Image (tube, rainbow, N blue to C red):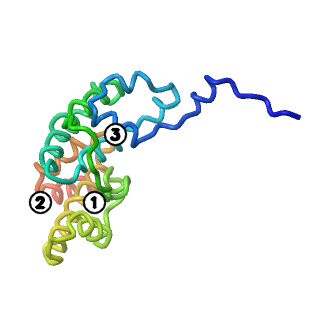
């Protein structure tokens, strides 16, 4: 028995979103690329992942690329007015591109999502590994010091996220900067803890 042919439009509907093809389109500043994606591909569009790869350009233009990615895309990418508009996110990613054609990128390690979202406190070991991979030429003593400070701050942020579960991550970061350890201890005492 012969296998039934799949209609052409259904074949294209099942195509996955190709991250590297999208990065190539960003490098070309192809502003219409997002419009050509199928509905399935649009559902799989991941602006966060594209932003990470966009900012990881290596070579002469590394600093310029990182700065543009931060200023033109990262600063507003997940703001309320943009987080629900993938087309606008795509346009900001293209605007942040250097527009010099295909760029060489290197994978950058990341911490786990639960650590970044302040749902779990980071361990000193995992933070040391992260910073060591991110900055392989930095003295291990400095990595240890930075890791300790990061873990201490991240622990405070996890505490604030637990106490104020409706706050956004941006607001938790600001509150962390404003509060002192003494004010947090006073809050705990006043709360009966």
Q: Residue at x 13, y 60 (%)?
A: 181
Q: Residue at x 20, y 66 (%)?
A: 135
Q: CB under 8 Å between callouts 1 and 3? A: no
Q: Position of residue 58 (x, y in %)?
A: 21, 53
Q: Position of residue 13 (x, y in %)?
A: 57, 28
Between label 2 and label 1, give the one nearer the viewer: 2
Left or right: 26, with 149 as reference point = right
Tell me the CA gap for discs 1 and 3.
50 Å
Q: Position of residue 51 (x, y in %)?
A: 29, 42
**Which comes sooner in the sequence, label 2 or label 3?**
3
Q: Quadrant of the N terminus?
A: top right
Name the residue tied to disc 3.
23
Q: Residue at x 33, y 41 (%)?
A: 50
Secondary structure of residue under mark 3 = helix
Tell me the CA gap for discs 2 and 1.
14 Å
Nearest to the observer: residue 134 or residue 163 = 134
Between label 1 and label 3, give the one nearer the viewer: 3
Name the residue tied to disc 1.
193
Tell me the CA gap for discs 2 and 3.
47 Å
Seen in the picture, residue 46 relative to 89 is either above or below; the reply is below
Left or right: 146, with 1 as reference point = left
Q: Residue at x 27, y 37 (%)?
A: 27
* Picture quadrant of residue 127: bottom left
**Which comes sooner in the sequence, label 2 or label 1?**
2
**Which comes sooner in the sequence, label 1 or label 3?**
3
Left or right: 32, with 128 as reference point = right
Residue most extreme to the bottom: 141
Secondary structure of residue under mark 1 = loop
Q: CB under 8 Å between callouts 2 and 1? A: no
Name the residue tied to disc 2.
182
Nearest to the observer: residue 121 or residue 92 = 92
Nearest to the observer: residue 148 or residue 162 = 148
């Amino acid at each position: 028995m012969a296998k039934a042919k799949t209609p052409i439009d259904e074949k294209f509907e099942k195509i996955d979103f190709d991250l590297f093809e999208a990065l190539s389109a960003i490098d070309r500043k192809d502003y219409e690329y997002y419009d050509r994606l199928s509905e399935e591909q649009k559902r799989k569009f991941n602006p966060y992942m594209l932003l990470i790869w966009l900012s990881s350009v290596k070579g002469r233009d590394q600093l310029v690329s990182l700065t543009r990615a931060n200023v033109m895309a990262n600063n507003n990418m997940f703001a309320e007015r943009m987080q629900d508009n993938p087309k606008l996110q795509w346009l900001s990613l293209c605007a942040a591109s250097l527009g010099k054609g295909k760029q060489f990128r290197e994978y950058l390690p990341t911490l786990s999502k639960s650590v970044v979202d302040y749902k779990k406190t980071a361990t000193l070991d995992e933070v040391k590994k992260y910073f060591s991979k991110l900055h392989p030429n930095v003295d291990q003593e400095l990595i240890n010091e930075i890791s300790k400070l990061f873990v201490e701050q991240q622990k405070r942020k996890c505490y604030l996220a637990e106490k104020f579960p409706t706050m956004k991550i941006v607001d938790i970061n600001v509150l962390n900067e404003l509060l002192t350890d003494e004010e947090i201890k006073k809050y705990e005492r006043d709360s009966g803890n």
